[in-house]
Image (cartoon, rainbow, N blue to C red):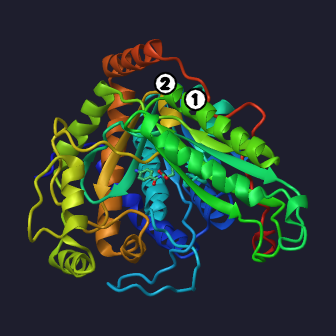
Amino acid sequence: MQNSEPVWDYVDEHSADLIGLADRVWGMPETLYAEYRSCAEHTAMLREKGFAVTEEVAGIPTAVMGEAGEGGPVIAILGEYDALPGLSQEANIAEPKPIEANGPGHGCGHNLLGSAALLAACALKDWLAATGTPGRVRYYGCPAEEGGAAKAFMVRDGAFDDVDAAITWHPAAMTGVAKAQSLANTRMDFEFTGRSSHAAAAPHLGRSALDAAELMNVGVQYLREHVPQESRIHYAYLNAGGTAPNVVQGKAKTRYAIRSTTLSGMFDLNARVEKIARGAAMMTETSVDISIMSAVSNMLGNKPLDEAMQKAFEALGGIAFDEADRKFAAEIQKTLTPADIAASYRSVGLEPREGEPLCDYVLPLELEGEKMMGSTDVADVSWAVPTVQAHAATHAIGTPGHSWQIVAQGKAPAAHKAMTYVSKVMAATGRMLMEDETLMARVKKAHAENLAREPYVCPIPADVKPPLQPRPAAAAE
Ligand SMILES: Nc1ccc(C(=O)N[C@@H](CCC(=O)O)C(=O)O)cc1
């Protein structure tokens, strides 16, 4: 049973347009600061819906902001539209089939994320206008969540300085308020420089940068025993020096992701990994250049905001999937292992169940699941302003993140239902914040208490700029 809520009709009025946007963005997957076409689509939609548009937020060409309303509190709704490399996949089939070999794909559902956020902003805009309520709603189109920390750069640039609270969501297997838990994460690059030489004729004259990179990795393997349990350290080779074994490699480059449950813990860990890199350079008589590519904080929670959003979820009830939705989700589940399916339940604190392809209920707020060990740049917004995040079931229970199965389900009717649904949850939460001054006061008090415990230090050094990508020729005017 759905109780009535003044903003929901406005969501329904705009939902067809925004579902169209989600499907178009699905079809033009763009990664890490190259989201020129997706951002242009979001910008055009903001204009069509009558928002005042600010382009290139924080100097990032693929970030956009739209505002509507006057006076009152400022509520930010955060959207994303970046895709992932290597996950190209056709829609609405339950077998792996890339559209373009090794091409990008929406493997984290950000085509839905951005569109549903913009839909919620449209509904709040109409409601503000219809009721004459003082208040402003902003849609922030944020690029490069996957590794680019765009929101952290936007926070650093002051993009949220006059915002009172932020609302967002993420596509998921289960529906409910997202627990405020994520790891702070620094992406640090290590470029070793040695001296190349003939590996057989004059090895004694060479100094191997590849050896240095490998010794650093070995050093970090030993470090793992002596770090707090919930740390994560992983790496990729950006340059292994070349393909010729008869060359002493003069250059090698790795990228590390260094993660911890707290900001201060991450800063400690960063310093320890840096020491190992310098040790490896010393051992091999090479030099190392260390730079931070991007970094995000851990997520801060806000109990009064979580409780307000839970009310919106409960007023709305679960997502009304139909038999066709369940049938396709069941087909997808056949491509998953029992462990995949059990993991979805355990992550939210439920015992695994059989014969349930889609989540059509709302999780209770008290349910304690497993800690989320990933990272997100929403966390930096959560330090800047009180922030709440919803999860809505856009895909079959058990679907792993960053998989072809997410892409395949990314413009299915079930995903569209979840998108409209979660827009209603976000719009209702925003409406409560705009109307209820005592709620806003409690939300702000909880936020101030969080910051009093540990102040925010931007995890990105002052001299590091976002790794922007040039505008592709095809997208130029
Ligand atoms: N609700 C979610 C938010 C983020 C992610 C995620 O996979 N994030 C990436 C990138 C995170 C980052 O910005 O450091 C990661 O953890 O590696 C997954 C679910």
299 vs 26: above or below: above
Give the labeled residue for mark 2: 72
Q: Nearer the viewer, residue 250 or 311?
A: 250
* Mark 1 nearby-residue class (10 Å; few <14, some 14–19, many ≥20): some
Q: Residue at x 84, y 74 (%)?
A: 200
Place of residue 359 in the rendered image (x, y in percent of width and height, measured from the top left)? 19, 61
Alpha-carbon distance for marks 1 and 2?
38 Å
Q: Nearer the viewer, residue 221 or 428?
A: 221
Classify mark 2: helix, strand or loop: loop
Dot 1 and dot 2 residues touching (CB under 8 Å): no
Q: Splitting the image into 4 quarters, where does residue 35 fall?
A: bottom right
Place of residue 373 in the rendered image (x, y in percent of width and height, measured from the top left)? 38, 46
229 vs 4: above or below: above
* Mark 2 nearby-residue class (10 Å; few <14, some 14–19, many ≥20): some
Kind of residue indicated by mark 2 = Gly
**Residue 81: numbered disc:** none
401 vs 264: above or below: below
Mark nearer the N terminus (1 vs 2): 2
Give the labeled residue for mark 1: 267
Place of residue 104 in the rendered image (x, y in percent of width and height, measured from the top left)? 57, 73
Q: Residue at x 27, y 80 (%)?
A: 335
Q: Splitting the image into 4 quarters, where does residue 207 fall?
A: bottom right
Kind of residue indicated by mark 1 = Phe
Residue 348 appearing in the image = yes
- Left or right of residue 128, residue 177 in this image: left
Count of marks placed on residues: 2
Q: Name the quarter where the C terminus is drawn.
A: bottom right
Label 2 beta carbon within 8 A of ligand 1: no
Place of residue 444 in the rendered image (x, y in percent of width and height, measured from the top left)? 41, 18
